[in-house]
Amino acid sequence: MMLFMYDGDQLPELLGEDGYTYIDDGSADLATGVTSLRFIRAVVGRTRRAWGAVALVGLVAGIGTAVMLPVSYLASTSVLLTPMGAPGEPSGAPIINEQALAQSRPVAELAVQQLGLQQSVTKFMTTYTATPATDRVLVITAKANSSAEAVARARAVATEFLRFRANLAETTQNLVLRSLNQEVIAAQQRLQSISTQISQLPARPTTPGQQARLASLTKAQAQAQTSLDLVQEAVTDNAISSQITTAGVIHDSQVLSPASPLPPHSRLKRLLEYAGIGLIAGLTLGVGVMIIGALLSDRLRRRDDVARALSAPVEVSVGGMARPRWWPGPRGLQAAPSADVKRIVAYLGSVLSSSTGDPMSLAIVPVDDVHGPAACLASLAISCAKQGLRVVVADLCHGAPAARLLGVAEPGACTVTVQGVQVGVVIPLPDDVVTPGPLDRRPSQPSVAKAVIEACEKADRLLTLATIDPSLGAQHLNGWTSAAVATVTAGKSTATRIHAVGEMVRLSGVTLVSGVLLEADKTDESLGVALAPETITEHPSHLDSDGSMVTSRRTVSGKPTAES
């Protein structure tokens, strides 16, 4: 089928010298719908089993983790501190510094050495926390596999923290005193240098230069002595202040409450916590993966998208069909078909009844999944046979799914009895790459098996199930039917594949009547209309005896306009 926009007198310009219309393959421009909240809701709805399974796995994993992990016991101790603050710090900063010091690696190393543990310091640091209760109280909480061990760890951390803190304060005080003493030494050295220079001058200078030099050094000596006195006084005051502060930091900081065990969490609460965490994690992961997968997928799901890619309307769309009823084996045919299968069979029956030729023929062309279409074809064949019609089913698919539903698995032509009626079944030989059909009698065509010709000559209805291999084409399809219905499973085929199947069916000379969408979303509100207004369609209906293609009719806006 070739489509082009009709624009009055410009029609001849769109035709080539041979009278055919040449257009570009538009499959690359096919849209897959707009992402929206409705789209996400549809994804979540149709993948509820998948993400539900992931959420269930997370729930089980959470419960298993709660059961398998050993129970942790907690112990806590509180420490009263005189925080070591620096000038200009905010009021809450000193206790935050104390918290960081308690959770530092040096304190953890000292605690590990005191406890004699063999575990790494990094791992030990994850077993305790220090939390400020007030601006002077720090609460240390430790966990272990037993209550006694937790108490020992909390006690060791508190002890080593106070000890490390005291050593740090003393070290800081010594550094301050050393810095002050260096200032005193520098002032003494300056005074000594000036005194040395004065001693080198004569006691009674005779020249004006010597007298000026002596006066200058004497003045400098007095200033240096005054500076030394001030520095010594400041050093004494700072030393006393630093000692008082350090003494307050060390002696006024102590354990406020001894380490004691905390009441353990109930097993039920622990189980519920881990189960909830696992469920939420699994649910988030499952839904996220499903949504991201749908956003990244180029598979078509909407009726309009499928119709646009197929260049044919989607007349029927159904939800997921219950495949276990129909597959595998003929026993599934004993069960009543589902409502979705009945809808498809009724539609296929109406298409078959409107077809021309003797026998009336129809082909179902699965674009992807063959099991659902095979079930519909088998049900249609039985329905026609129950009306007293002679029916032949040609299964050209790999594995012959429709023939197996009718109880036939061997290649060849035979007649079987299913549900009290007889149905002819044709299965091509395994070596047949392309199976010629009995309806194409051109001399150039390969010979058709005699048994196949005899079976089809006596038939009133010829039903074909055929998949199309892009590498082989579909030229053999017009030997089995004059009309075809393509079936597409939502979310399984790309626009390129659907478009290719539709084009190959049309190039074979078979009329692609419509498409049937399986496993369609309930939230899909598109119409499944392929042709827009003001379009012209050429339908190549058959091949002439010399092998040239004959165009049967031309349609403008869905209405026939001319015969050629």
Image (spheres, helix red, strand yellow):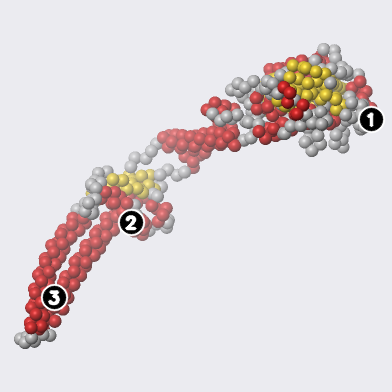
Seen as rendered, the residue at the extreme front is 9
Residue 375, given in percent of the width and then of the height, sits at: 75, 24
Would you place residue 180 above or below residue 483 in this image?
A: below
Residue neighbourhood size for the residue with mark 1, other residues' Cα within 10 Å, grouped as few (<14), some (14–19), many (≥20): few
- Of the residues shown, which amino acid type is indicated by label 1? Pro
- Of the residues shown, which amino acid type is indicated by label 3? Leu
Q: Quadrant of residue 353?
A: top right
SS for dot 3: helix
The number of discs equals: 3
Q: Earlier in the sequence, mark 1 or mark 3?
A: 3
Residue 253, given in percent of the width and then of the height, sits at: 22, 53
* Residue at image location 62% in from the left, 22% down from the top: 526
Q: Which residue is mark 3?
A: 191
The dot on residue 107 is 2
The answer to whether mark 2 and mark 3 are in CB contact below 8 A is: no
Q: Quadrant of the C terminus?
A: top right
The answer to whether one can see residue 397 in this image is: no
Q: Quadrant of the N terminus?
A: top right
For this rendering, which residue is in front, 62 or 42? 42
For this rendering, which residue is in front, 190 or 433? 190
Q: Which residue is mark 1?
A: 443
SS for dot 1: loop
- Of the residues shown, which amino acid type is indicated by label 2? Val
The dot on residue 457 is none
* Residue at image location 18% in from the left, 69% down from the top: 183
Q: Nearer the viewer, mark 2 or mark 3?
A: 3
For this rendering, which residue is in front, 144 or 246? 246
* Residue at image location 56% in from the left, 33% down from the top: 291
The answer to whether one can see residue 303 in this image is: yes
